[in-house]
Structure formats: C-alpha cells, structure tokens
Image (cartoon, rainbow, N blue to C red):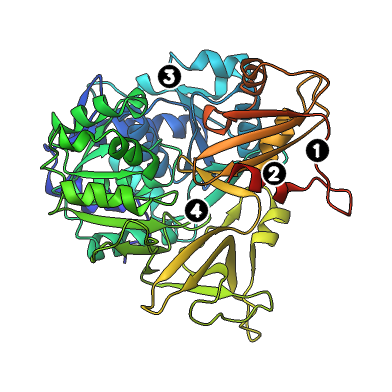
Amino acid sequence: MQINVIEYFENGALRKCPQKLAVKDASRECTFADLERFAKNCAALILKRTQARNRPIPVFLGKGAENIVADMGILYSANAYANLDVKSPPQRLQGMLQNLEPEVIITSAAHAAVLRGLQIPEEKLLLFEEAMVGESFYDNAALLRRIEPVIDTDPYCVIHTSGSTGVPKGVALNHRSTIDFVDWAFDRLGLDGSEVMGSLAPIYFDAYTLEFCMLLAKGSTWMVVPDQLAMFPAKLVEFVASNPINFIFWVPTVMVNIANLDLLAKTRLDRLNKVFFIGEVFPTRHLNYWRRHLPGAMFVNLYGPIEITVACTYYIVDRDLDDDDKLPIGYPCRNTDILILNEQNQLTQVDEPGEICVRGSSLALGYLNNPERTAKGFVQNPLNPHYPELIYRTGDLGYWNSRGEIMFLGRRDFQIKHMGYRIELGEIEHAVLQVDGIRNCCVVYSQARKEITLFYECDRELPPAFIREKLMVTLPKYMLPTVFHRMELMPRNPNGKIDRQKLVASVN
C-alpha cells in the first residue's frame, strides 16, 4: 500500500520511462532520470542543513524544472514543501515565512536577494543551482531509508490562502489525502501518462498538486506555459497550438477571455482532449463555446476549497446545457462525502440550499500554527454524536438538484473566488485602511462582472493609481480593486454597521 507521495515516482515514471521528457520550461528540458539526479542531490543538500522531519520547507523559486526538483527533494528528505509566490509583496512574504518557521529555504541566486532583504540568515538559504549539476552526490539507499518511517498522515505540503487579519493562512495537507484524491483522478478521469500538460496554474495553487502527481506517477509531461501569456489570450492559444499539449487544468477566467475574443475560431486546438477547470464558476455560455470548438474533448468541472485536497466534487460535462443553465459541481469524489446542512445542522432536501460540508480522508490537517482557526473550520460532524469525526465547513452554499447533482450557489460569508483564487474581502479592507486619508471602507465583489469594487470614505477623491500603488505593498495583484468609489459617508444599517448588502446590490 502506498503511503508516501514520492513513491509515485520511484514506482512510476522513474521505473517505466526514465528517458522520457518530463519537464519543459523556457530555459531547459529534463528527463525523468534527470529529475531523479537533481531531486536526490537536492535532498542530500537539505539533509546537510537539517535532520528535521515533517517540517515545511519553503520554496521561493519561479515556476519550472527548478520548483519540481525542489519539491521532490523536500519529499525525499521526509519533509513537506511550501511553494511561495516570488511576486509576493515583502510584508506578505514575511508573514508566510514567520508562520512556516523554516530551518532552510530553497531559492535561487536570482531570488535570494529578496529573502536577504527580509533579514533571512544566509545559513538558511539553499540555492537550487547546487543540486542541478551533472554528477550525483547522494546516497540512494540512505534516502530510501530516510522516507521509510513516513506515514500517510504526515504532512505532504503547505498551501497558503489569504487571512482576514492580513496574515496568510497555511493549509497543511497530508500524504493520505493527496494519494486518495490522485488515485481516484487517475482511475475516474482516465489519466494514463499520455498527457502533455499545458501548465498555467501557479505552483502555490492547489491544481498544481494533480499536475505534479501526474508527472511523478504516470510519466505525463509537464510543459510550463509562460506566466505572462495569461494576460494575452491570443498568444496563449498560439502557444498551446504550437506545442503538443493535449491536457489543460486552468481557472475559468482565462478560458472566458479566450471565448470572448472568439480565438478558437481562428486557431484550432485539435490536440486538446482533456480540459479540466477549477477555482471559480465557469459561465455555461463560455463553456459551450469551448465545447463547440472541441467536440471530442472531455470537460471536467472540479470543485473544492484549499482545505480539501484539490477537489471534493467533480462533474464530467456529459450532456447539453443551455447557455443560461447553471453548471453542476456534480458528485462527491470517491471516499468523500458531501453533507449539505441547513441552519439547524440537518441534511437538506432536494433543491433546498444549505452549507456544503465535507467529510473523509480528503480533509486537510488544518491551518499550520493556527489551532484556533483550525477549530473553527474543522468541526465535529453534527450528525454523528457517537465518536469523534471531523467535517470541514466550506462556507459555500449549494443544493442537490433532482438529478442527484450538487449545484453551487456562492459564498456564505464575504470570502470570494476571483481569478481562481480564494480571497477574503476583509484582508483587502485591512490593507485599504492603512492608506493615509481613508477613514473607512467596504470592499464588495460583482460576480457578474468579475470586479472587486472599493467604496471608501475620504475628504477628497484619491486617484485609483495612488490607492493601488499603496495596496501593492501588502497585496498581490489579483487582490487589488479595479473599481473605486469615494463616499462622504458609508450607508449604515439600523445597528450602525456599514450596509454591505446595499453596496453589493449597487454593483450587481
């Protein structure tokens, strides 16, 4: 029985196809044999710095072969990787590093200066270039002994999401939850190693987990799409068309932009046979556009918060949908149970909305170094008074339709999904209130227009560029408001609080 994710590689791609192309990025190509040498060299370097086990090791690298090597090396060292965004504002990056409490950080000569600027001690920095050499300097038997004590409930990786107080939360996932999901995906979604992945998801996004495991276990080829192409849909389509890419796993925003520009009518993507998407609602009209142009492809809608390993429900689009139909999020993945609970913590009936809750092996371990927040999200199953059993309350609303499919309604609170990212509006508000002159604010989201709108109280109109410049110190680009409204006084409800619903209604 497999208990460690790195065993996917030892028993999968490394054994079956060592000389096959594994990774192609803008600067290099690597076979699976190359990945073994580099990753095990990396593990040997980690173990020279620390003998710690089951600790998160940050990876501060750009997307490409180097981050694959680093993540594999960390797993061989019996630790958990934590991929970070190299474009994170310094304050945000510092908060994540403080939460991780790392003994070593894997970075590159090009990115190390940022970490030094945060006063990270030099002895904690491990440059990946030291591992990417022609010779092997690891002890293979010792590394395999190193991972023998790993059990499936040990941490596999840490993925960060935003926090309402401005401090990002690190979600710790384990080997069991990862293997449980990935084995199901291989079986149910027909992933067999023939895939050439056009990888667009950031390495700190949970879609990366599936791509990484497809690479390790099945020998699928991981082809990195240059980051900047996400902003240029025509160039993105041309990149896919000019490479042997037959699999994509993207957020719908990118695909909506392609549909709006009618790019698939101009450039054929005939090789694409599997199109997966996750992270936000895909408007059915735009999905139908893609289906018309790729009639032979499998389209799969995956749903799941970061606190669930990759996804907890799926929907293989297997019937015609009208443009104004809602797209189901489908059915629970294998070994996962979905409970939709009403306000009385009772199971809902067909067409009755309630909160989507999840139980099963797919649940994360919790939030790293944050037991209070963990206890709020991961709670005792209210339907089970007999023994301890945790469920995760997603905060998302949904319902079962008459077909037995789960339908998604939206957020229960003020947390949104925008451009594939889970964002807490409170974190944006927290940053806005640090801007001189702004007395009060409210941030709302237009689902229809995919816009983050800032309402603020101020004595004078502030240029949007000025506000965005101030916010970029602490917030990543995808969290910046795009619409700005100055108000002399915020609308208030009877209890004196800002009337958020009135502001929401004004943008929808």
Quarter in which the N terminus is drawn: bottom left
What's under tag 4, amino acid-wise? Leu
Mark 2 falls on what kind of element?
helix
Vertical position of residue 309 compared to residue 52: above or below:
below
Mark 1 falls on what kind of element?
loop
Q: Which residue is mark 3?
A: 108
Which of label 1 and label 3 is nearer to you? 1
Horizontally, residue 369 falls left or right of residue 133, namely right
Q: Which residue is mark 1?
A: 490
Residue 251 in view, yes or no: no
Q: CA distance from mark 3 to mark 2?
A: 45 Å
Which of label 2 and label 4 is nearer to you? 2
Vertical position of residue 62 compared to residue 313: above or below:
above
Q: Which residue is mark 2?
A: 503
Q: Which mark is residue 173?
A: 4
What's under tag 1, amino acid-wise? Met
What's under tag 2, amino acid-wise? Leu
* Sequence-wise first label, 2 or 1: 1
* Sequence-wise first label, 3 or 4: 3
Rendering coords of residue 79 (x, y %)? 47, 44
Are discs 2 and 1 less than 8 Å apart at CB?
Answer: yes
Which of label 3 and label 2 is nearer to you? 2
What's under tag 3, amino acid-wise? Ser
Q: Which residue is farthest right? A: 495
Q: CA distance from mark 1 to mark 3?
A: 47 Å
Rendering coords of residue 66 (x, y %)? 34, 27
Rendering coords of residue 197 (x, y %)? 23, 41
* Sequence-wise first label, 4 or 1: 4
Q: Residue at position x 38%, y 64% from top?
A: 328
Rendering coords of residue 195 (x, y %)? 17, 46
Foreground pick, 489 / 282: 489
Mark 4 falls on what kind of element?
strand
